[in-house]
Image (cartoon, rainbow, N blue to C red):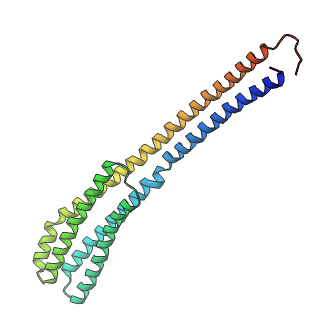
Amino acid sequence: MSITQRFGLLTFIAALGLIGLASFSLHQMERIFAVANFADTNSLPSVLVLDDAYREAMTIEGLLWQHIAMTDTDKMAVIEQKLNLSTLALLSALEKYEKDGLIVNERDHALLIADYAAQSALNSLRTSVVYLSKSKKKDAALKLMLDGQGTFSNLSDAMQAHRILNYDLGKHSAGEAESTLQYALRFHMVITGLVIVFVVLVGVILFTSLPSGSNAP
């Protein structure tokens, strides 16, 4: 094998090593980005959706108290319209959580089901309170509202548990991104060293095998 051919072979081997190293680095960068970006693409949007749902639930509670305290039929009708809008908004927020692909595991899905159950219980309470209040059975509506405070507490607890899960998932992803970065850096250094050593060894083998004093092309 001529010197030119040996140089060509050595260059080819070095190029393969560099291409492999570049491919690995690109793969690790994509992985780190995906993990580190989890909080922005999932955890934060999830919490915002749950906050929207909880805000509508608190609006419903306030409107129900207003309806019980109100005696004017027209004003009660206006409150009922607002209640309907908030009820739809609450349900839409929970549906958005599912439609936007924010569910990441079985625990997340189970908590969303709990959110739906709490929303359904709140809707039943709303319907009953409004019916009694419209029927001028204000005392009964007030008693039902007081007895039904556990419904609001259950919804609050369900959504808080769901928010905590998303916070923990975001925190875990940040830690995983850091671990992945450290692993990638160490692995990159090792592979770089191995490529250099391998190229040097191949070069030494190729050129030490040249005939002594050979200058032939």
Determine the residue located farthest toward the front in the rendered image. Answer: 1
> In the figure, 172 relative to 5: above or below?
below
Q: Quadrant of the C terminus?
A: top right
Q: Is residue 12 left or right of residue 161?
A: right
Residue at point 61% right, 28% down?
Answer: 191
Query: Residue 166 placed where, x, y %?
Result: 37, 51
Question: Quadrant of residue 205 in the image?
Answer: top right
Q: Is residue 114 left or right of residue 6?
A: left
Residue at point 78% right, 23% down?
Answer: 6
Q: Is residue 150 left or right of residue 56?
A: left
- Given residues 99 and 184, the one toward you in this image is 99
- Given residues 125 and 73, the one toward you in this image is 125
Residue at point 63% right, 34% down?
Answer: 20
Total labels drawn: 0
Q: Quadrant of the N terminus?
A: top right
Query: Residue 162 placed where, x, y %?
Result: 32, 54
> In the figure, 76 relative to 28: above or below?
below
Residue at point 75% right, 29% down?
Answer: 11
Question: Quadrant of residue 57 in the image?
Answer: bottom left
- Given residues 36 and 146, the one toward you in this image is 36
Question: Quadrant of residue 163 in the image?
Answer: bottom left
Query: Residue 12 placed where, x, y %?
Result: 73, 30
> In the figure, 53 relative to 205: above or below?
below
Query: Residue 185 placed where, x, y %?
Result: 58, 34
